[in-house]
């Protein structure tokens, strides 16, 4: 008899951008509604099981919030401590992709292995990086930190799909970046897909409209199809930057920066 892994899933909000507009977030613009204000939230995600603590993405450092004019709310390690987890207890960090808002402050997790797709690491350490439209999406020191982690043997490379812990699998989908991966989590009740930037907002996937920053449009559409096929209901897909995530799921102990998804 197969036992369903008892994984708990949380979204942790750490920063926000309040000055964005719809035209920035939907591929091809949004016509008459393009000037409409649309805030953006920044999250990391926690998957806690019996023998593992998996953090999905690390967010950016507070100094990056200052240089990029984002509103800093609270560091992810401080939120982990509110859940009774010390950063050194994190067993795995899944890096969904290497944009600046997903891969900063890796040194906060001294015991973790870092899970990355081959295609993503190869792209961001290859010839495309000097191009301005790519370079603006990363922080050079973040990539240098990953190279150092690789030299120390702490990067775990995946080429496609792999179950990294019981009931926790990564899956290459691409689209937003060359090697974007989603995280598929089996919980006691249902399956959850942490889409990260495969869908920034529920509206992206609900309306079949890719986000404005896209590496390959056809791959992003295929990512939508893959995600839809993995879940029983649309609310089991958790987008990467939607402020509604913090509204649709219950806060943990009254802390509105930490919500429990499953």
Image (cartoon, helix red, strand yellow):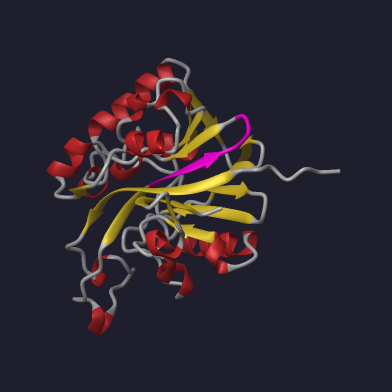
Q: Which image quarter: residue 150?
A: top left
Q: Position of residue 58 (x, y in %)?
A: 37, 38
The region drawn magenta spans 44-51
Q: Nearer the viewer, residue 84 or 77?
A: 84
Indicate yes or no whether the magenta region holds residue 48: yes
- Residue 218 showing in the rendered view: yes
Above or below residue 204? Residue 87 is: above
- 184 or 142, nearer to the observer: 184
Residue 68 in picture, x, y percent from top left: 16, 46
Q: How many marks?
A: 0
Residue at 60% of width from left, 67% of height from top? 233
Is residue 117 visible in the rendered structure shown here?
Answer: no
* Image location of residue 238, percent across then percent down: 48, 58
* Residue at the bottom extreme, as displayed: 32
The residue lying toward the viewer, choosing from 251 and 11, is 251
Q: Residue at x 43, y 47 (%)?
A: 178
> Residue placed farthest to the right in the image?
1
Q: Residue furthest top?
A: 152
Q: Nearer the viewer, residue 152 or 85?
A: 85
- Residue 6 on the magenta span: no
Tell me what residue is drawn at x 40 percent, y 20 percent: 110
Left or right of residue 190: residue 196: left
In the figure, 14 relative to 31: above or below? above
Query: Which secondary structure is most common in the magenta stretch?
Result: strand
Q: Quadrant of residue 201?
A: bottom left
Q: Measuring from the top left, give residue 7's x and y in whole percent.
A: 61, 43
Q: Quadrant of the N terminus?
A: top right
């Amino acid at each position: 008899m197969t036992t369903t892994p008892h994984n708990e899933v949380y979204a942790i909000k750490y920063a926000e951008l309040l000055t964005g507009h719809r035209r920035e977030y939907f591929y091809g613009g949004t016509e008459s509604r393009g000037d409409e204000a649309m805030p953006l939230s920044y999250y990391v995600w926690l998957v806690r099981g019996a023998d593992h603590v998996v953090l999905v993405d690390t967010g950016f450092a507070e100094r990056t919030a200052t240089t990029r004019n984002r509103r800093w709310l609270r560091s992810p390690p401080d939120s982990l401590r509110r859940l009774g987890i010390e950063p050194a207890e994190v067993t795995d960090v899944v890096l969904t992709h290497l944009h600046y808002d997903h891969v900063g402050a890796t040194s906060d997790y001294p015991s973790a292995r870092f899970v990355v797709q081959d295609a993503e690491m190869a792209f961001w350490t290859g010839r495309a990086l000097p191009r301005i439209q790519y370079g603006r999406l990363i922080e050079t020191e973040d990539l240098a930190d990953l190279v150092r982690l690789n030299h120390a043997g702490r990067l775990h490379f995946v080429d496609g799909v792999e179950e990294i812990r019981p009931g926790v699998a990564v899956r290459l989908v691409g689209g937003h970046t060359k090697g974007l991966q989603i995280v598929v989590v089996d919980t006691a009740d249902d399956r959850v897909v942490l889409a990260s930037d495969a869908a920034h907002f529920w509206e992206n996937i609900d309306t079949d409209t890719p986000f404005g920053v896209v590496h390959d449009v056809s791959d992003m559409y295929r990512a939508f199809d893959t995600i839809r096929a993995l879940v029983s209901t649309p609310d089991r897909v958790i987008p990467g930057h939607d402020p509604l995530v913090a509204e649709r799921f219950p806060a943990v102990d009254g802390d509105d920066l930490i919500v429990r998804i499953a």
